[in-house]
Amino acid sequence: MDEKVVDRLQERIGYRFADAALLRMALTHRSAAHQRSVGRSGRRVVKGAGSNERLEFIGDRVLGLLMAEWLLERYPGEQEGALGSRHAHLVSRTALAEVAHALDLSEALDVALHEERIGIRETANVLSDALEAILGALYLDGGLDAARVLVRRYWSGAITAQAQPPKDPKTALQEWVLARGLSLPVYAIVSADGPSHAPRFVVAVHAAGACGEGEAGNKRAAESAAAASLLVQFGEAPGTGIK
């Protein structure tokens, strides 16, 4: 892992880790951790060991808490439904990937050579997972205050852009067909492939005699993308996808 690249990332984050090993782990993709472990021992190792997956687990919770805290401050008059809609968008894979790009996170990721060749460091799944891992590392190294600085700096544009609570495209599409007395949308998986750590789902949705398709790293997000595609066909502005 290039230390100069890691230093530049810490500058963009606005925090210097006391325990640099936490940041290095946050940047370590499962493929790189597995490659090193097998290379040293020649034995089978626990799946994910030494990678950023444990930090991702806690970082997901840290982001959820900090975003909920921020939304309560910013929208004191809104109730759970509207706040939940805003929250779902702001912690979505799409929002995370956008922040990861703003941080230029891909250049700092540690991935195995064979995964490097297929461009995995640029995929939304890998980038968003690594960003959650960094939030987990920030929390463990500097507490909620350290993680809060990153969240409020890099999500400020997204939260400011939410003039109204965003609506998930699946909900928007359902409301659209029901308002016209039509049958509910029908979703179907077209394909599901890719490696276990970076699956790709393609889902089709049929409604009002038309069909839309969406692709994402999980079924729920692919359904949301398909609904958004169909809403565009109907001349409607789709809501914002969810994680």
Image (cartoon, helix red, strand yellow):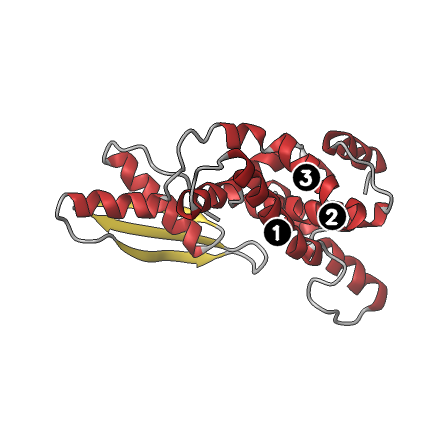
Residue under pointer 2: 139
Residue under pointer 1? 60
Q: Quadrant of residue 146?
A: top right
From the image, state whether disc 3 or disc 1 is nearer to you. Answer: 3
Residue 176 in the image, given as x and y percentages of width and height: 22, 42
Q: Look at 40% across and 37% down and name the residue there.
A: 165
Q: Amino acid at mark 3?
A: Arg
* N-terminal-most mark, 1 or 2: 1
**Earlier residue among tags 2 and 3:** 2
- Residue type marked 1: Asp
Q: Which residue is mark 3?
A: 148
Residue occupying image coordinates x 73% and y 53%: 32
Could you say where residue 54 lies in the image, as x and y percent from the top left? 70, 58
Which residue is rendered at x = 78% and y = 35% of the image? 15
Secondary structure category for the residue under label 3: helix
Question: What amino acid is labelled 2 in the image?
Answer: Tyr
